Image (spheres, rainbow, N blue to C red):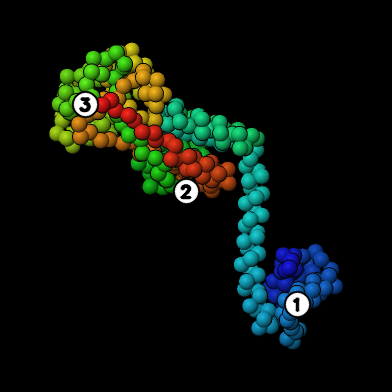
Amino acid sequence: MIDIVKLKTFTTVADLGSFSKSSDVLYVTQPAITQQIKSLEKTIGCRLLRRQGGKIVLTEEGERLYQKAKILLDSYDNLVKEMSQLKKDIKDTLYIGSSPTFGEYKLPKLIVDFQKLYPSITVKLYVDTSKKIEDGILNGVINVGVVDKDVDEKINSVELFRDELVLCVGKNHELTRKSIIDPEELYTIDLVMREAYSCTRKAVKESLESMGLNFELLNIKIETNSMISIANIVKSGYGASFFPKSSIQKDLEQGELIPIKVRNFSAYKVFNIIYYTNFVKSALVDRFIQFILSHKDSLGEAVGFRS
């Protein structure tokens, strides 16, 4: 078996063209270097170095080994650095940012599971608008984020999952008597909606307008920036709202919210994992991103409409 240390000694002698200079650089005695080279030549089965004038040069076989050895040693050095960084990272703090829909419903459980894998780390979670999470990434305050909007081109973005938007009412709402409604019926329903600049509202607006509806004529009676507040209002029996299905899965399973199909309506929120390409992505951040991506198939459950 070829020894990494001997390969390092061999390439150093080849680079410096001298046993004595290599001895100074490697902090190894010259006889020890000579012995390592002889041992390597014995393992390889051919002569690797020769004297030319007052300098040590590579033989033809030595040249071939040198090229392969440099690649191997570079890979080895990178691996050592990565493992050293990971050892440091696992005691580090991970700053995560997320928009409310994902940050309040799906992300907490994922963070707990990730914390179990790396119990020495500290996680700090910030839940805010996608724009503020994006700013935090750009400013270096947040290491990695999950947002539901297009971001600055300087930020690296990886699609996580698409979250279907569904119209829901409370279990005692009169609309539960219907299995499907026509889009025009939305004009007659009191609606509870996210604030005007939210990505959820934007996706609903674009879909309805593509179907010929005038979004401005809808009866939007209550606006708020909290999906939790919207869910509680609708569950109380007042009005209806469009929800990202991942945020209400528990309420759907328990029958607290009832999905109502709108004919030909289709809208999604696209969630992306983001981090800033200008910052060095630590091994811990990379591990977290890979962990989240490994769970992407479980993030969007199907919604069962009433038949």
Front-most of 105 and 28? 105
Does dot 3 land on a helix, a strand or a loop? strand
Q: Residue 114's image quarter? A: top right
Front-most of 196 and 107? 107
- In the rendering, at what x and y percent does residue 106 appear? 45, 31
Does dot 2 land on a helix, a strand or a loop? loop
Q: Which residue is mark 2?
A: 277
- In the rendering, at what x and y percent does residue 241 appear? 28, 23
The alpha-carbon separation of the residues under discs 1 and 2 comes to 45 Å
In the rendered view, would you say 171 is above or below 84?
A: above
Residue under the point 69% across and 83% down: 59
Does dot 1 land on a helix, a strand or a loop? helix
Which residue type does callout 2 highlight?
Thr
The alpha-carbon separation of the residues under discs 2 and 3 comes to 46 Å
Label annotation for residue 41: 1
Residue 31 visible? The answer is: yes
Left or right position of 59 against 274: right
Q: Earlier in the sequence, mark 2 or mark 3?
A: 3
Residue under the point 63% across and 47% down: 85
